[in-house]
Image: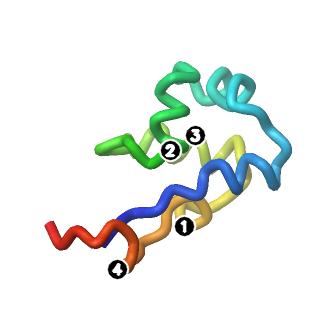
Amino acid sequence: MAIIVNLDVVMAKRKIGSGELAEKIGITQANLSILKTGKAKAVRFSTLEKLCDVLDCQPGDILEFSREEGGNDE
């Protein structure tokens, strides 16, 4: 099971770059990259709220659950 991060897709649809988004939500580009690649172990609700506000989307547009991806049942 896995959580799939579609942040890069939403960013592309909104035509916003990593630098601009990181600045608007108040995190570093490095931390935004970790989120985008799905390597983050956790996401603060405050960060998710800012992402949704700036990108004008819902949390489900950014995050997706899949039983297939990853193949790890932990």
Q: Nearer the viewer, mark 3 or mark 4?
A: 4
Q: Is residue 27 above or below residue 50?
A: above
Can you say which quadrant of the picture contains the N terminus? bottom left
Q: Disc 2 designates what residue?
A: 37
The amino acid sitting under disc 1 is Gly
Q: Nearer the viewer, mark 4 or mark 1?
A: 4
Earlier sequence position, callout 4 versus callout 1: 1
Estimate how packed mark 1 is, as few (under 14), some (14 to 19) or many (20 or more) residues with alpha carbons within 10 Å.
few
Instruction: Tell me, yes or no, whether the two marked residues, 1 and 3, touch with CB atoms within 8 Å.
Output: no
Q: Disc 3 designates what residue?
A: 50
Q: Is residue 67 above or below residue 34?
A: below
- Label 1 to label 3: alpha-carbon separation: 14 Å
- The residue shown at (70%, 41%) is 54
Q: Nearer the viewer, mark 2 or mark 1?
A: 2
The one of 31 and 68 positioned closer to us in this rendering: 68
| Quadrant of the rendered image containing residue 68 | bottom left
Where in the figure is residue 45, as x and y percent of width and height? 41, 45
The amino acid sitting under disc 4 is Arg
Where in the figure is residue 49, as x and y percent of width and height? 53, 46
Mark number displayed over residue 67: 4
Where in the figure is residue 22, as x and y percent of width and height? 62, 26
Q: Disc 1 designates what residue?
A: 60
Left/right placement of residue 40 relative to residue 23 reads left
Left/right placement of residue 16 relative to residue 3 reads right
Mark number displayed over residue 15: none
Earlier sequence position, callout 2 versus callout 1: 2
Can you say which quadrant of the picture contains the C terminus? bottom left
